[in-house]
Structures are given as C-alpha cells and as structure tokens.
Image (spheres, helix red, strand yellow):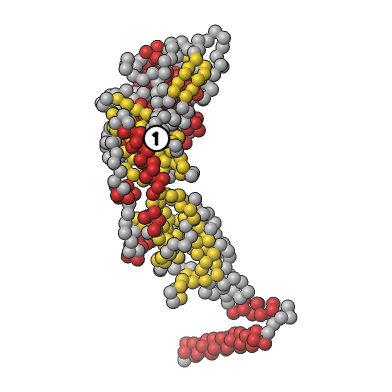
Amino acid sequence: MIFLKNFPRVFILNLNFSRKNHRERRGRTLVAAWLLLTLVFLSPQRAAHAASLLLDAQACVLVEQESGKTLYAINENERMYPASMTKILTALVALEYLKPNDLVVTGDEVFAIPADASRANHKKGETLVVENLIRGLIIPSGSETACVIAVAVAKKLNNVEEMGYVEAEAFFVRLMNEKAETLGARDSHFVNPHGYHSEDHYSTARDIALIARAGMENELIKRIALEREFSGDGANNRAGSDALTQHYEWRTLNELISGGAYSYRYATGIKTGWMDEAGYCVAASAEKDGMRLIAIVMNSTEVGRWRDAADLFEYGFDNFSRYELQTEGETVLDAPIANARLGTPKRLALVAEKSFIEFLSKDEYETLEQVVTLDEGLSALNGEEREMRAPIVKDQVIGSVAYMIGERQLFEGALLAGADVQERTLITDLEFYFSEFKAGIISTKALYAVGGAIFGVLATLFVSGLRNRRRRRRRYY
C-alpha cells in the first residue's frame, strides 16, 4: 500500500460550497482546475494501448477487482460469444436461491445438452449437494450441471415437485438476464445456463468482467475457482443410504492454476470457455501483494488465451499500484484562523469526510493534483493564503477536496472542521485578559492592552452617542 501525502495542492478560491450552488460550483471548479493544472491527460485506455501488448485475443479487458477500474482493454464492448464463461453467472444465480448444503436430485435434464458439450458426467436420479454442483460447473465445466441447477432453482421458486426442462430453462434464463442487468452487464443476452452456442447468446468482455467480479466476491465461488481438482462423493456423504450417489474425480480445465506448463503463479481462477464460434476464452483472476485483478480474454487461440491472460496480469501488476489518497478523519489541510479567540489555537485542521483509495498507473500518479475549495463565507484571502473565519462548529462542512488528473476528476468529497472555533471580539479579549489577571500572570503589556480595550469601548460609546444626538437634531430641526 502506498500513501500519497506530498503531492501538489491547488486552491480554487471564492467558490461557495453549498447544496444550493453545488452544480454551479462543480462546473466552475472543473473549469478553474483545468486552467490551473497544465498537465498531460492520460486515460487508462491510452496508457493501456501505449503498452503495445501482443495478444492473440480479439477482445480483452483487464480490471482491478475492488474498484472495477479498467487498466487495459481491446474491443471490450464488442459483442462476442462467451461460451462456458456463462457458467459464472449461472453459479451466481444458483447461490441466490440455493444454499451450499441443499441436496438436489437430478432428472431428465442431465440429457438436455448436445452430445459435444462439456460434461461433469452426472447420472439421472443421483443426489448432489449444491456446493458440488458449483464445483461441477467450474472445475470440469459441466454443461448438464448447469441444467440441473436451472431445474432446481425453477422448481424451488415455483414451489413444484416436477417441471420440464424447457420450462425450467426459460424461467432460469430470465433470472440470469435480470442478474446481468443488475450487475451492469447491459450489452449481454443469455438463452441457456451453460453457454453452448446460440446466435442470441452473447456478451462482451466488459460485461463478463462485471460478472466475474461479482463471482469472485462470492466466497464459495472464489474458493472453488482456485481448486485444481476434486475427489469425493457428490453428496458429501450426506445422502441417505437409499439415495443414488457417485464418486467424482474432476480436474480443472484452467491451465493458469493447473500447475502445468501454462500456469501463472498469481492466478486464482476462474472459468474457461470454448466453442468453434467463440474461440478459446478465459475469465481469469490473479492476486499479488493484495492487488486483485480480473482478465477477460475472448476469441483467442488454444494456447494464446493462457499467454494473453498472463501478459495482461503482468502489465497490471507492473504498471499500477493501490494508493490511499486520503482516509476518513485525516487532516487534509491545516488552515490559519483570521479571528480566533485569544487563548485558543490559531490554526484549524480541515479533515476528510470520506476515505478515497484509487488504483493508478505511475504516469497517472505523477500528474495527480489535489484541489481544495473553501467556502467563501467561512474564509478570506490574506495575501496568497486562505484564512478561516470564526465562528465555526466542529464537523461543519467548510469546503471540498478533489483529486484531478488533468481535466478528469477522480473523486470529490467534503472537508469538515476538525474543531470548534470561537470568534474573537472585544468582549472575549477582555474576558481573556481578566482571566490572566486573576491567575496572577498578567503582564504589563497585557495591562496596557486591557486599558486600551476599555478606552476603545468608552470611545466607541461616546462617538455613538454624539452621532445619535446629531441624528436627533437633524430630525427635529
């Protein structure tokens, strides 16, 4: 983790920070920041293509798992066929409605796939736990496993004991498309739970990345995606003695985690895909030094998909870092106070309301600017420095802090007062000197100040009285 502390700060002055003027202030802030920040704008897309990676994939995208930020992309919005990467979405939908320890009995749906589809080799009438159905989806890429899941979910939600596969699939596919929409994968359309080719079954690298991110946030999917193999009873020895079960020996199809020639040491999953029309695909994940990446490779070559994923990961790990730009409650600026009450601090900590963490390339980091905007009603310009003006209440919103790369704003959050600030007045000065006098530590200088203050009060009252008398004379003349 890298902490960004000493980076350039730019003040945008005389802008109100209020809900009423928020839209106008935001626009003016961006314009002013653009004028002040003479920086080279470098987007993630430009940085990505500048790397000139030589990939076999027709489309790909590399994203950071936590934030979803795109680090590299080629044709990421082009519609393509996802093949068995579809099964990540199937697993997500399954675990919304079924518990990992639920028992499921298979039916005729185990025969509802084409002869050349990938299989986990389930039998009709056998009992499995949902956890192992998820394994069957991911490790051997069981297409009939997806059909079993679709029927199990459809029967449960429709509260029926029996349901034909065609009806169940249609019901489950609706759930899949609704889930994709919820995740933001809006340029996708799914017509089956296993990904076998259909002209109407399509997605994009970006949409699959959204689905894969959600999958890796699910602890069961995340754990199974990293398993090289599974050996055991399909029901985890939980079925009754009369139940049909079988022993499975599954080995992953994902060469990135297999331990073989194309393994990538930081790989953590997730799911492969292949069809003639889709080409060779992989939704891959990797983690290094706390940084988690997702790489989606579509329509590559048989060996190229592993190299493509590894190259994308290396590019991401080599060129991007996690920066904690600010933390909640952290002092962003220590500002002077123009009229602080005597005996109180002369500076005020302006603290961040929210934390902000971002993944940036080295180039982006070098051009990052922090822009501080202070409420003009609570501050005044004194030379080149902006001073706060009392009274101020602790946690009062007194401005904003934004982080900019050129004209691109990454984040904007409120700045809060770190303490109460009382206004200095003639009365508070007298109270301060009197308290000093009572304490026996008043100085000669302070006595002169007290005398001067008293004289000032009397003079002010005298002058005010004269003015009032003159006004009265004018009025009745």
Name the side, left or right, on which 433 lies relative to 131. right
Q: Mark 1 points at which residue?
A: 284
Quarter of the image for residue 339 reads bottom right
Mark 1: secondary structure: strand
Residue 3 lies, with reference to residue 169, above or below; the image says below
Q: x%, y% of residue 445?
A: 64, 86
Q: x%, y% of residue 348?
A: 54, 67
User: What amino acid does circle 1 point to?
Assistant: Ala
Identify the residue at the far top of this view: 242
Residue at the image position 61 percent from the left and 71 percent from the top: 344
Residue at the image position 43 percent from the left and 11 percent from the top: 124
Residue 182, can we see it?
no
Q: x%, y% of residue 410?
A: 39, 53
Quarter of the image for residue 34 reads bottom left
Residue 193, can we see it?
yes
Identify the residue at the far front of this view: 261
Circle 1 packing at 10 Å, graded few (<14), some (14-19), many (20+), is many
Decide which of 161, 329 is in the foreground and name it: 329
Residue at the image position 49 percent from the left and 44 percent from the top: 290
Residue at the image position 74 percent from the left and 80 percent from the top: 440
Q: x%, y% of residue 4?
A: 47, 57
Decide which of 394, 221 is in the foreground and name it: 221
Residue 39 lies, with reference to residue 60, above or below; the image says below
Name the side, left or right, on which 457 lies relative to 248. right
